Amino acid sequence: MKNSRTKTYIFYEIGDSCSVEFKMKKGRFHPTEDAVVIGISKGQNFQAAFKKLQIESPWVKEYKFDTVVAREIGKAIYL
């Protein structure tokens, strides 16, 4: 029997386009590597969820990404 469970995925971008510098307390700047959330979508797999996200958010098709990461969302852990 095929697993047809719908999963929720978060899609985010990492790479050169997500680099930023933050000002430190002493006035110097510190480089960081950030992630930019593209969106959250549901599907039977990450490909189906990403296609659905592109339909729901048409700008995603036009955006040039460095590296897109898909992660299945589980139970939230608050720090």
Image (tube, rainbow, N blue to C red):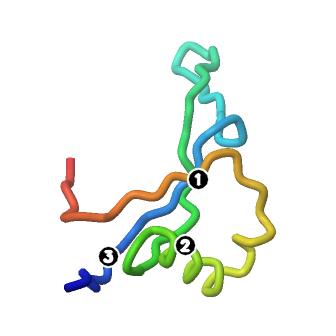
Q: Are marks 1 and 2 in contact (CB under 8 Å)?
A: yes
Q: Earlier in the sequence, mark 1 or mark 3?
A: 3
**What percent of the width, then of the height, locates residue 30?**
59, 20
Is the residue 31 above or below the residue 67 in the image?
Answer: above
Mark 1 to mark 2: distance in Å? 10 Å
Q: Residues within 10 Å of mark 2 (few under 14, many from 20)?
A: many
Q: Amino acid at mark 2?
A: Phe
Q: Which residue is mark 1?
A: 68
Residue visible at 41% across and 80% down? 42
Is the residue 20 above or below the residue 7 in the image?
Answer: above
Q: Is residue 12 left or right of residue 67?
A: left
Q: Earlier in the sequence, mark 1 or mark 2?
A: 2
- Secondary structure under the numbered disc 2 in the rendered image: helix
> Along the line of sight, which residue is nearer the eye, 40 or 48?
48
Q: Which residue is mark 2?
A: 50
Mark 1 to mark 3: distance in Å? 18 Å
Q: Amino acid at mark 1?
A: Val
Q: Residues within 10 Å of mark 1 (few under 14, many from 20)?
A: some
**What percent of the width, then of the height, locates residue 5?**
26, 83
Q: Which residue is mark 3?
A: 7
Residue visible at 46% across and 77% down? 41
**What percent of the width, then of the height, locates residue 43?**
41, 80
Residue visible at 50% across and 61% down? 11
Q: Residues within 10 Å of mark 3 (few under 14, many from 20)?
A: some
